[in-house]
Image: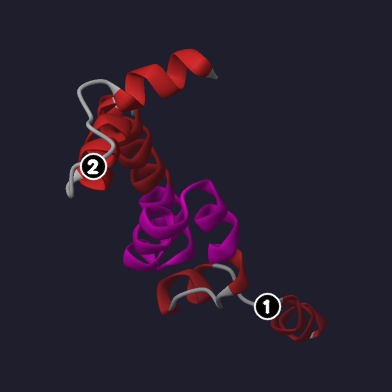
């Protein structure tokens, strides 16, 4: 913990008016931004693919962008799009069709 505090406080004068800004900048430098960026891109691509399969590609991509992997599962809470509904009719419609 002391090592982390030293990294965050490096070059910061605690008495200066912009000390909080300098501490924030130092904390942001410690974050691995490229892995986070590629993880977000991966989540959006998977969300768009799942959304395309459900007939709601943009909803899947948007949910994945905002919520990450949780958005993949949230996509199933929404009804299927028109194209997916035609491709996979509800079970009750299939039963009526089979009885004829």
Looking at the image, is mark 1 or mark 2 earlier in the sequence? 2
Is 20 on the left or on the right of 80, as rendered?
A: left
Q: Nearer the viewer, residue 28 or 79?
A: 28
Indicate which disc residue 19 carries.
2
Q: Is residue 24 above or below residue 33?
A: below
User: Which SS does the magenta portion mostly show?
Assistant: helix
Residue carrying label 1:
90
Q: Nearer the viewer, residue 48 or 22?
A: 22
Q: Are the two marked residues, 1 and 2, in contact with CB atoms closer than 8 angstroms?
A: no
What percent of the width, then of the height, locates residue 53? 46, 56
**Other-residue count near label 2 (Cα within 10 Å), few / some / many at <14 / 14–19 / ≥20:** some
Distance in Å between CA atoms under marks 1 and 2: 61 Å
Quarter of the figure with the C terminus = bottom right
Q: Residue at x 28, y 37 (%)?
A: 14
**Other-residue count near label 1 (Cα within 10 Å), few / some / many at <14 / 14–19 / ≥20:** few
Which residues make up the magenta segment? 47-75
């Amino acid at each position: 913990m002391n090592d982390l505090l030293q990294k965050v406080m490096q070059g910061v004068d605690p008495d200066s008016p912009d000390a909080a800004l300098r501490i924030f900048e130092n904390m942001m430098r410690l974050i691995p931004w490229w892995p986070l960026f590629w993880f977000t891109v991966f989540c959006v691509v998977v969300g768009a693919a799942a959304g395309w399969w459900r007939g709601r590609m943009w909803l899947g991509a948007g949910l994945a962008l905002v919520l990450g992997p949780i958005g993949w599962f949230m996509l199933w809470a929404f009804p299927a799009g028109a194209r997916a509904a035609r491709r996979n009719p509800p079970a009750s419609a299939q039963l009526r069709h089979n009885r004829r």
